[in-house]
Amino acid sequence: MSKLYLHLRKRFEQAILKHKMLSPGDRLLVGVSGGADSLTLLKLLAGPLLFVPKPDLVLAVHVDLGFDGPEGEAVCGFGAIFSSRGV
């Protein structure tokens, strides 16, 4: 793991603890646009959490608005990656 990833994970868990965002048994619905921020959030939630309770379920949702372009295709590709991690 890179230093940046470890730093993000540390700050991510600090924010969760500070604001009491997760409790044991929580189920999460994450809106995924295909951008770097939503995919990073999804990766952090799907990875190992050291100091906060891991959610029972993380469900990623992407709404296809029907616009032409590569955005929808890229998000569909990430579905296979995250499904192997239980998201």
Image (cartoon, grey):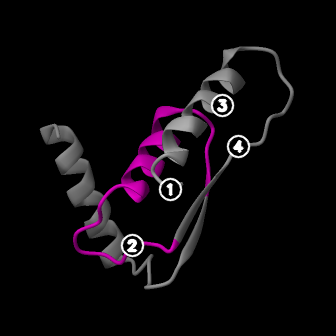
Name the mark nearer the viewer: 4 or 3: 3
Please tell me whether residue 72 is drawn above or below residue 20 in the rendered image.
above
Name the mark nearer the viewer: 4 or 1: 1
Earlier in the chain: of badge 1 and badge 3, it is 3
Q: Residue furthest left?
A: 3
Q: Which mark is residue 62?
A: 4
Q: What stretch is highlighted in magenta?
A: 30-56
Q: Point out the image quarter for the N terminus.
A: top left
Please tell me whether residue 72 is drawn above or below residue 81 in the rendered image.
above
- Report the Cα–Cα distance between label 2 and label 4: 22 Å
Q: Point out the image quarter for the C terminus.
A: bottom right
Q: Where is residue 43 in the image (x, y as percent from the top left)?
A: 41, 47
Q: What residue type is labelled 4?
A: His
Name the mark nearer the viewer: 1 or 3: 1
- Report the Cα–Cα distance between label 4 and label 1: 16 Å
Name the mark nearer the viewer: 1 or 2: 1
Earlier in the chain: of badge 4 and badge 1, it is 4
- Determine contact: label 4, label 3, CB under 8 Å: no
- Determine contact: label 1, label 2, CB under 8 Å: no
- In the rendered view, does 28 fall on the left or right side of 52? right
Secondary structure state at the residue bearing disc 4: loop
Q: What residue type is labelled 2?
A: Lys
What residue sits 55% from the left and 47% below the top? 83
Q: Where is residue 63 in the image (x, y as percent from the top left)?
A: 77, 42
Secondary structure state at the residue bearing disc 1: loop
Q: Residue 54 carries which label?
A: 2
- Report the Cα–Cα distance between label 4 and label 3: 9 Å
Please tell me whether residue 65 is drawn above or below residue 70 in the rendered image.
below
Say which residue label 1 marks. 86
Name the mark nearer the viewer: 2 or 4: 2
What residue sits 31% from the left and 75% below the top? 52
Q: Residue 22 carries which label?
A: none
